[in-house]
Image (cartoon, grey):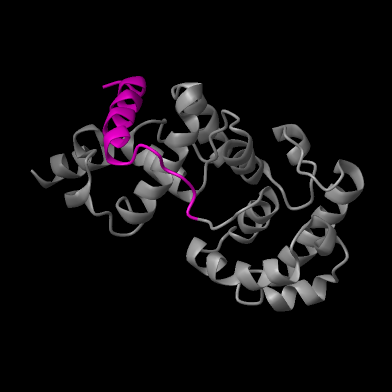
Amino acid sequence: MTPEEKVRRIIEIFSKINPEPTTELNYRTPYELFVAVVLSAQCTDVRVNATTPAFFEKYPDFEALAKARPEEVARVIRSISYPNSKARSLVKAAQKIVNEYGGQLPRTLEELQKIPGVGRKTANVLGAVLFNLPALPVDTHVFRVSKRLGLVPPHLKTPEQVEKALLQIVPPDERIRFHHWLILHGRYVCKARKPLCDQCPLTDICDDYQQRRQAQK
């Protein structure tokens, strides 16, 4: 089965199982999603969701955050991984957004990546979720699941390489859902250390599963 055929099969299966997948980060506004996504780097969504209510009460928008001192922000997010560096990035980002974009997030991937603390993956997440851009963010789950299933060549080493390969085979109008599906599948079923293959609806198209079965014969 070709990668394109596998993609069509995945879309068919998950469209029935979870037709409207979305991020598990809690947010109400673009500002809140921005903060949550920045905080989620190398940190679980559960931890972020436990931290952001107090953060948003203290800093309700970009204007308030732009006036904050990084050390104050770090204390509010001290339970998050790398609180000091994330606090500095958030304050610098808020200042740039207020001063150069009128307090509103820019709506293109290129402009988003000019904001401090916003790399390609973060820009893709914001663009896809907030502005419906046909981006396909590659986090650790998307990276792992794509390679295990055989959607991308096994020799690819970076998220950017995997993203480029996926963009060639996933239809633009399905990229946002596809991204969420692979994240959720990697988080709850195709786990890094002990994948729950007995609960997986994709074993018949999974290269990793089929190879392990052959090795056991």
Position of the C terminus, as image quadrant, is: top left
Residue 155 shows up from this direction = no
Residue 81 in the image: above or below residue 101? below
Q: Report x, y in % for residue 93.
A: 80, 53
Q: Quadrant of residue 106?
A: top right
Q: Count of labels shown?
A: 0
Magenta stretch prevailing secondary structure: helix
Identity of the residue drawn at 32% across and 23% down:
8
Identity of the residue drawn at 58% across and 36% down:
128
Residue 117 in the image: above or below residue 79? above
What residue span does the magenta drawing correspond to?
Answer: 1-24
Q: Report x, y in % for residue 161.
A: 55, 33
Depth check: give the residue in front, 21 or 217.
Answer: 21
Residue 72 shows up from this direction = yes
Identity of the residue drawn at 81% across and 76% down:
71
Instruction: Please identify the residue farthest to the left as the structure is shown.
Output: 217
Q: Report x, y in % for residue 168.
A: 49, 21
